[in-house]
């Protein structure tokens, strides 16, 4: 049986990890990786994978084309790719865009959304990454889900509305958490402590939230309504971090029904 031919448009963080996984997936062949500048795609995929420009992708006649570029670039990229062969299933890795944005490429379109943060050079086990699939029809959805199952043990179907909520949850989970960790590192650096001292606390926080739920796991001055402690900490914080401390403390108190006056913090 011939391998299913897959191409990727894009050479960023998500594309890099997908290329690595697809290049070694049983029954699949990564035939091309395209970017505006082919040199950006040369290190993605297997040694036999061609690096090309977007406009060259149709010539490879892939069975599946995964478009993995920044949301703001999607219209320029689809214009550069142009119409694909009629049998090619084209999928976006976006958590926010609709599959219909790929209509200029093919009516056989869908979504291939990995719910994870990716950084080039930082290994990620795709087997643990949840993939969320949508297709123009059940046939396209199943084609994409079959590929996802070769990469991951966690494959789900989600329409555009549910995927929007997933993406918002992802922003809170990853982007906002990472920013808060950055604040922690700054505070520790300024106090002369190693950043490592916060790692056991972070690990325990995540483990508890996963096991018993974030509400039950919450501790600290805000959940106790300890205004005196919070005021003192606000005074000691660099001014740039005070609005975030205040907003999060008030959110905790609101969630846990702790009575407070808005101007107390």
Image: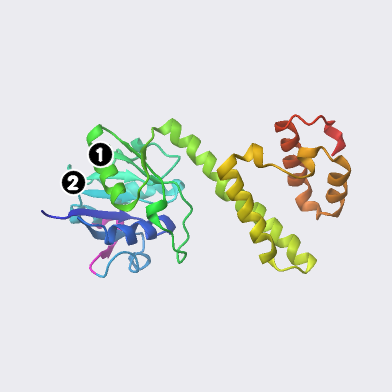
Q: Is residue 109 visible?
A: yes
Q: Position of residue 212 (x, y in %)?
A: 59, 40
From what the image shows, is residue 243 above or below residue 135?
Answer: below
Q: Secondary structure at mark 1?
A: helix
What residue is drawn where x is 26% and y is 70%? 47
Nearer to the camera, 212 or 180: 212
Query: Label 1: which residue?
Result: 142
- Numbered range of the magenta stretch: 48-56
Quarter of the rendering containing residue 243: top right
Query: Label 2: which residue?
Result: 85
As for residue 217 lying within the magenta part, the answer is: no
Q: Is residue 108 visible?
A: no
Count residues near mark 2 (Cα–Cα under 10 Å), then give few for <14, some for 14-19, many for 20+: some
Q: Position of residue 159 (x, y in %)?
A: 38, 32
Q: Position of residue 193 (x, y in %)?
A: 75, 68
Count residues near mark 1 (Cα–Cα under 10 Å), then give few for <14, some for 14-19, many for 20+: some
Considering every residue shown, the one lying at the far front of the view is: 212
From what the image shows, is residue 28 above or below residue 227?
Answer: below
Quarter of the rendering containing residue 110: top left
Q: Which mark is residue 68?
A: none
Nearer to the camera, 201 or 171: 201
Q: Secondary structure at mark 2?
A: loop
Q: Quadrant of the C terminus?
A: top right
What residue is drawn where x is 34% and y is 35%? 100
């Amino acid at each position: 049986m011939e391998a299913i031919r897959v191409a990727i448009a894009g050479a960023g963080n998500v594309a890099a990890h997908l290329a690595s996984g697809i290049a070694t997936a049983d029954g699949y062949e990564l035939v091309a990786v395209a970017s505006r500048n082919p040199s950006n795609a040369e290190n993605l995929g297997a040694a036999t994978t061609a690096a090309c420009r977007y406009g060259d992708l149709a010539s490879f006649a892939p069975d599946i084309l995964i478009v993995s570029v920044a949301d703001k670039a999607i219209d320029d990229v689809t214009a550069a790719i142009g119409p694909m062969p009629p049998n090619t299933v084209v999928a976006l890795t976006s958590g926010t865009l609709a599959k219909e944005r790929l209509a200029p490429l093919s009516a056989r379109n869908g979504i291939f959304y990995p719910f994870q943060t990716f950084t080039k050079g930082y290994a990620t086990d795709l087997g643990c990454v949840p993939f969320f699939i949508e297709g123009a029809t059940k046939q396209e959805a199943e084609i994409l889900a079959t590929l996802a199952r070769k990469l991951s043990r966690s494959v789900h179907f989600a329409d555009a509305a549910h995927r929007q909520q997933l993406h918002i949850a992802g922003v809170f989970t990853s982007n906002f958490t990472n920013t808060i960790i950055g604040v922690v590192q700054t505070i520790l650096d300024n106090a002369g402590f190693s950043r490592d001292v916060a790692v056991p606390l972070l690990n325990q926080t995540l483990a508890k939230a996963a096991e018993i739920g974030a509400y039950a796991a919450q501790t600290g001055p805000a959940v106790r309504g300890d205004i005196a402690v919070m005021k003192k900490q606000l005074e000691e914080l660099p001014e740039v971090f005070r609005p975030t401390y205040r907003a999060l403390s008030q959110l905790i108190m609101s969630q846990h029904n702790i009575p407070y006056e808005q101007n107390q913090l």
